[in-house]
Image (cartoon, helix red, strand yellow):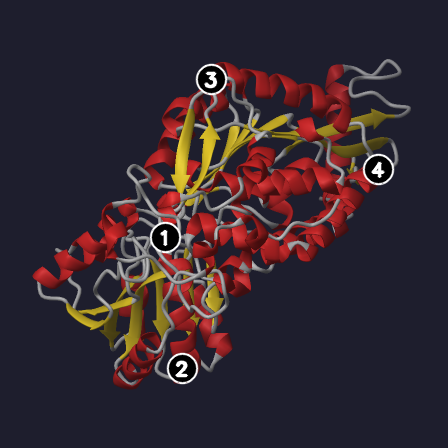
Amino acid sequence: MTSLTYPRHMSEAISGSGASSEGRGGPSIEGPHDPEHDPRASYALEPEHVARLTDRILATTGATTQVHSPINGAPVANIPQSSTEDVAEAFRRARVAQAAWARVSIDERARILHRLHDIVLDRQAEIMDLIQLESGKARKHAFDEPLHIALTARYYARTAHKHLDTKRVPGVVPGLTKVELNRVPKGVVGIISPWNYPFTMALCDGLPALLAGNAVVAKPDAQTMLSALLGAQLLEEAGFPRDLWQVVAGPGRELGTPIIERADYICFTGSTATGRLIARQAAERLIGCSLELGGKNPILVLRDADIERAAEGAVRASFSNAGQLCVSTERMFVADQVYDRFVERFVARTKAMSLGATLDWDADMGTLISADQLETVTAHVDDAVAKGARVLAGGRARPDLAPYYYEPTILEGVTPEMTCFGNETFGPVVSIYRFHDEADAIARANDGEYGLNGSVYTRDTARGRAIARQVKCGTVNVNEAFGATFASIDAPMGGMRESGMGRRQGAEGIHRYTETQSVATQRLIRFGPMLGMSDEGYARFMTASLRLMDKLGRA
């Protein structure tokens, strides 16, 4: 198949600079717009190209939802909407496909998954274009998505046998009891993915599910459906059967429950409030779920930190994807011995960032995705300033760059009565605090109910790892923002406390999609009296056997 590059399907306006302040109130396509001067007048993608992607949605309602690009408000696509009956049909098709797929060898599944690794790397420009068009993020942050999927595909393809092969474990009677552990696929996995990383979050949790022999019914977020659909297309091009990955579209409040009612396992990435609802519904059905939820992630900059390295990491930690990243930093605790020097460098680096909403590599930070996100960020900053916080950088919307653009913002003097103190902003806003005692800094970092990601900056890495063990987060990076843990696919990733349950990546990331089945084969003897032995005699015999095995060091 010939690879298509998205700019060949886009209106010229998308490749240019961000929108003017006219878009601040939300994009619209009503009225006599002039395509030469108003990007809202024509679609950003050719309808035929969009139709090839949306054809993968199982939707029979006839209803559609129009989505627009946050870059300049241009309409992107009309997304067909699914019904509860469509969800039921998606699961029916997925179950038929899964029954056949489970009989495919592990080697063949791994071979197809490894082919996806190559396809994603080959098609990365096309993938990044579409991600940017739908989400508005900077290109260097869009690159993180094909990179992560390639890493995930390669890791699970090369470790398939390690995770899925039948394993032999000791039986109760050495030599006479043989026990094997099988990894049996759960069946059909329901995946509800978010808009902030629309390509990687749509695929990364499903790849190990497919490798383990499952099928998937996916419901991506409405704002970024095309990136997820492109992922589904690439899965088929790699060799996965088309019916193995079903896609439905519609509001979570309408389709979430029908998916949970039919799935054998649920994987969700999103808000803590929604995660609670999903956990309750999954518990009612006695099915498993993994939930990656909210965070109020901390960085600790210790007195011996490399200031320049910490400042560089803080910029990435706080402003990657305009702060719309579950593991991004929103709270920063800095030792008073280095506080002034660190703040000077952090503020200088932040103010030197190149701002914009384009498809090229020039921008250091892209735009927020929607009016709702802009409203939340603006409200948090305005509330903090009104209550006495100081703005060290940023602090204002920039509709001249894009309809929902907000500057990277550093706040000082944030106090508990301010909304942004303990509530997740999910935008380019970070609060910075001074500390003197490290024990106090750790306690403040652990304050609240979240526990997703943290960072520690210090030249003494052994001490950094010791402090990391005291931070109540599922992932903690030493001298890095988030990439070291997130990109190390052999390491589990997930949250503690209200940041979620379950883990993606590593062995846990694939074993969650399997049932462990123990098969024991017994030879020669039975577990009961033999050869005229009484029950009491059998009990004495087994007691003596247990003592002997204990002396031999047997577990």
Is 365 left or right of 146, judged from the image as shown? left
Q: Which residue is mark 2?
A: 305
Q: Amino acid at mark 4?
A: Pro
- Quarter holding residue 528: top right
Labels 4 and 3: the sequence-earlier one: 3
Position of residue 506 measured from the top left corner of the image (x, y, whole percent) = 62, 50
- Give me the residue at 70% from left, 25% from top: 98
Height in image: 468 above or below 304? Answer: above
Label pair 4/2, CB-CB below 8 angstroms: no
Height in image: 207 above or below 91? Answer: below
Q: Amino acid at mark 3?
A: Thr
Q: What label does residue 72 carry, if any?
A: 1
Q: What label does residue 174 carry, if any?
A: 4
Judging depth in this view, the residue of 160 and 313 nearest the camera is: 313
Task: Mark 2 vs mark 1: give the one in front.
Answer: 1
Q: What label does residue 236 carry, if any?
A: none
Label pair 3/2, CB-CB below 8 angstroms: no
Give the distance between the C-alpha atoms of the residues marked 4 and 1, in whole angstroms: 70 Å
Q: Which residue is mark 3?
A: 61
Q: Amino acid at mark 1?
A: Asn
Position of residue 371 measured from the top left corner of the image (x, y, whole percent) = 28, 46
Q: Amino acid at mark 2?
A: Ala
Height in image: 292 above or below 321? Answer: above
Label pair 4/3, CB-CB below 8 angstroms: no
Task: Mark 3 vs mark 1: give the one in front.
Answer: 1
